[in-house]
Amino acid sequence: MAYLLAGLLGLAFGAGDQYLGSMSWLGPWTSTVAQVSAPWLIIAFVAGTTQPRARRAMLVGVVATAAALIGYFAMTYSPMEVPEWTFGRFTSGVVAIATTGYNPAYILGGVTMAPLFGLLGQQWRVRRWWVSVPAVAGVLCLEPIARWATGQIPYTAPSVWAFEVAVGAVVAAVFTLAILARRAPSDTG
């Protein structure tokens, strides 16, 4: 059941991310949000938090991320996105998008990091492991810097990148407070 739920969550996330990116009539921020990578790792983390055992959390993280990628690529060439849709156009389009540009590197990065973030989620659930804090907050706060350093940051909506960093700071604060609250001696009188 956990794998099914992780798969459905991943499919919905990936398809929703791609569809949001196509909604240009809302403004340039939609395509910028669709290019943010950190949520793709955080979905594996969230899936991992549902599991009490490490190995299963890692697998659930992979399932969620792989399903998100499938949802993204499937939506890209779905009847909602492609006029005059045919199955042949769908399959050739999905293969083309998954094998060109930066996409193979993104796929490899997502699938290799998914087990780690699934494990981080499980460890956060089980023992509020402090390593989860810099990992999750770090992908949010550091993504804009990494994209800028590699020349991959679109400047169409800089507020999106500022928002991502702000969310990372809030996540770091909330996680840190949760760790401190767990370590604080309880006043049971």
Image (spheres, grey):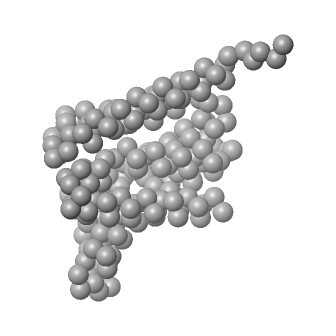
Residue lying at 77% horizontally and 15% vertically, measured from the top left: 187
Residue at the image position 21 percent from the left and 62 percent from the top: 25
- For residue 151, what is the image quadrant? top left
**Quarter of the image with the N terminus in it:** bottom right
- Residue 120 position, x and y percent, is 54, 38
Q: Residue at x 59, y 35 (%)?
A: 124
- Residue 37, relative to residue 131: is it above or below? below
Quadrant location of residue 3?
bottom right
In the rendered image, the residue lying farthest to the front is 26
Residue at image x 27%, y 84%? 85
- Residue 12: x, y in percent? 45, 63
How many labels sit on residues? 0
Left or right: 128 with respect to 78?
Answer: right
In the visual, does 96 lie left or right of 4? left
Give percent across and percent down for residue 80.
Answer: 31, 76
Find residue 164 and report its image quarter: top left
Residue 187 makes an appearance in the image: yes
Q: Is residue 28 above or below residue 11?
A: above
User: Is residue 139 depicted above or below 40 in this figure?
Assistant: above
Q: Is residue 69 visible?
A: no
- Quarter of the C terminus within the rendering: top right
